[in-house]
C-alpha cells in the first residue's frame, strides 16, 4: 500500500499493525527551550513582550500572533497567578480510574496575557474556585529535567 492509496468508502480503511516508524523529532523550539531552561535552572518563568501590541506571551513565542512582530524582549514572569478555570480529572491517560480525583487548572499568571495548564495541590478540591490566587511550586533543582513537569504543582497563596 502506498501513501497515495485512496479510500473510496470507510469500509476500505486499512489499519497499521505494530510500531509506526518516524523519522522526525518534536522540539520545544527556540522560545520553548529558553522557557523550559529558565524553569529548570532558575525556577522562574519567562515571557516575551510584543512592543506593538504590548501582549506578554506565556508560554513565550518568537512572533506576535496579532501583528506578526518579531519578539526579542524577554521578561521574568511572577510564579503567582490565579485559577482561570479548573476541572477534576478522574481517569489516567490509559482510561483507568485514579485513586482520587486530581485538580487540573488553567493558571493565568500575573503580569502575563497567557498562562499554564497544571495540577493544583495542598487544597481540598471542593475549596477550589475561579479567581483563587495560587503560586507555582517547583521541584527540587536536582530533580528538574527541563519540562513542564519541573513545576510540581500550583498551591493556594
Image: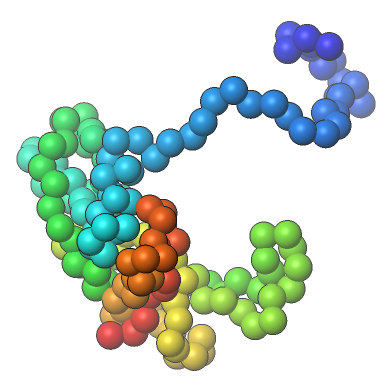
Quarter of the image that includes the C terminus:
bottom left
Residue 81 horizontal side relative to residue 18, left or right = left
Judging depth in this view, the residue of 6 and 91 nearest the camera is: 91
Residue 87 horizontal side relative to residue 41, left or right = right
Find residue 113 and report its image quarter: bottom left
Residue at 26% from the left image edge and 45% from the top image edge = 34
Residue lying furthest right: 11
Q: Is residue 57 above or below residue 45?
A: above
Residue 117 horizontal side relative to residue 78, left or right = right
Colour pattern: rainbow
Residue lying furthest left: 51
Residue at 73% from the left image edge and 29% from the top image edge = 20
Find residue 3 and report its image quarter: top right
Q: Is residue 129 above or below residue 16?
A: below
Say how many tags the image has.
0
Find residue 32 and report its horizontal and vertical position in percent: 33, 43
Find residue 104 and report its horizontal and vertical position in percent: 49, 70
Residue at 35% from the left image edge and 35% from the top image edge = 29
Residue 35 horizontal side relative to residue 129, left or right = left
Q: Is residue 59 above or below residue 89?
A: above
Find residue 83 and report its horizontal and vertical position in percent: 36, 73
Find residue 137 and report its image quarter: bottom left
Quarter of the image that includes the N terminus:
top right
Judging depth in this view, the residue of 88 and 131 nearest the camera is: 88
Q: Is residue 135 visible?
A: yes
Residue at 24% from the left image edge and 69% from the top image edge = 79
Judging depth in this view, the residue of 81 and 78 nearest the camera is: 78
Q: Is residue 2 above or below residue 146?
A: above
Q: Is residue 117 visible?
A: no
Amino acid at each position: 500500500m502506498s501513501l497515495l492509496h485512496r479510500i473510496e468508502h470507510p469500509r476500505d480503511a486499512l489499519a497499521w499493525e505494530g510500531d509506526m516508524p518516524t523519522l522526525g523529532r518534536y522540539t520545544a523550539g527556540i522560545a520553548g527551550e529558553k522557557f523550559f531552561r529558565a524553569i529548570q535552572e532558575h525556577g522562574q518563568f519567562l515571557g516575551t513582550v510584543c512592543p506593538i501590541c504590548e501582549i506578554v506571551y506565556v508560554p513565550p513565542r518568537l512572533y506576535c500572533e496579532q501583528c506578526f512582530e518579531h519578539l526579542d524582549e524577554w521578561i521574568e514572569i511572577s510564579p503567582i497567578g490565579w485559577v482561570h478555570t479548573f476541572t477534576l480529572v478522574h481517569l489516567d491517560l490509559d482510561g483507568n480510574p485514579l485513586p482520587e480525583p486530581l485538580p487540573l487548572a488553567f493558571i493565568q499568571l500575573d503580569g502575563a496575557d497567557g498562562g499554564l495548564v497544571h495540577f493544583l495541590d495542598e487544597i481540598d478540591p471542593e475549596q477550589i474556585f475561579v479567581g483563587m490566587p495560587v503560586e507555582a511550586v517547583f521541584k527540587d533543582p536536582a530533580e528538574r529535567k527541563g519540562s513542564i513537569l519541573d513545576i510540581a504543582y500550583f498551591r493556594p497563596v
